[in-house]
Amino acid sequence: MLYTVEQVSKELNISKQAIYKQLKKEEFKQFIVIEKGIKHIREEGLNCLMGVDSKDLLIKEQRAEIERLREENKRLMSLLEQQNTIILNSQELQKQALTNTEILLLKKREELKRRNEEFNKHSKLYNWVRLKFSY
């Protein structure tokens, strides 16, 4: 972002003359941009005038970003743990349902076996009676 000398003087609460004096120094020349005959100061120049080193500012921003990423990482890890718990519970419920189904199938098998035996018993009796009375 570019600032005019007037904007910088208001921002820093110092006179325009003091700013122009600083801008004449060699170390500030890299921060000056002239557009349509008006001197503008880049944000890095403003930071330099305020005594803030752009490297320090960058480091501060990067540390804030790292902290934000750590918090995001913690949140995501928490969500993963919740998801794992849900999956484990789901697997346990599926295992339980499978066990219940197996038990029901075994009971049904026994029931069918019993009915088949009953049917065969009645069928033999019926055949015996039929044979007895057919002669």
Image: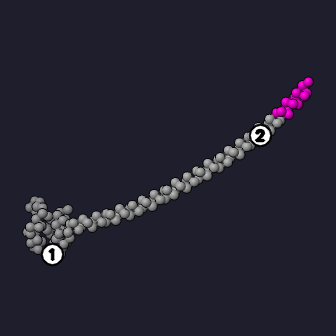
Q: Quadrant of residue 105?
A: top right
Quadrant holding the N terminus: bottom left
SS at circle 1: loop
Main SS category, magenta section:
helix
Colouring = one colour
Q: Nearer the viewer, residue 55 or 50?
A: 55
Q: Which percent across, then down, holds residue 121?
A: 82, 36
Quadrant holding the C terminus: top right
Using the image, determine if residue 17 lies above or below residue 86: below
Quickly name the residue at label 2: 115
- The residue positioned 61% from the left and 48% from the top of the image is 98
- The residue positioned 55% from the left and 53% from the top of the image is 90
* Image mark count: 2
- Does residue 3 appear in the picture of this structure? no
Which disc, if any, is residue 121? none
- The residue positioned 17% from the left and 64% from the top of the image is 42
Q: Residue furthest bottom?
A: 14
Q: Which percent across, then down, holds residue 23?
A: 10, 68
Quickly name the residue at label 1: 14
Q: Amino acid at mark 1?
A: Ile
- The residue positioned 14% from the left and 64% from the top of the image is 31
Q: Amino acid at mark 2?
A: Arg
Using the image, determine if residue 123 lies above or below residue 41: above
109 sits to left or right of 119: left
Q: CA distance from mark 2 to mark 1?
A: 104 Å
- The magenta span reads 123-135
The magenta stretch spans residue 80: no
- Does residue 112 appear in the picture of this structure? yes
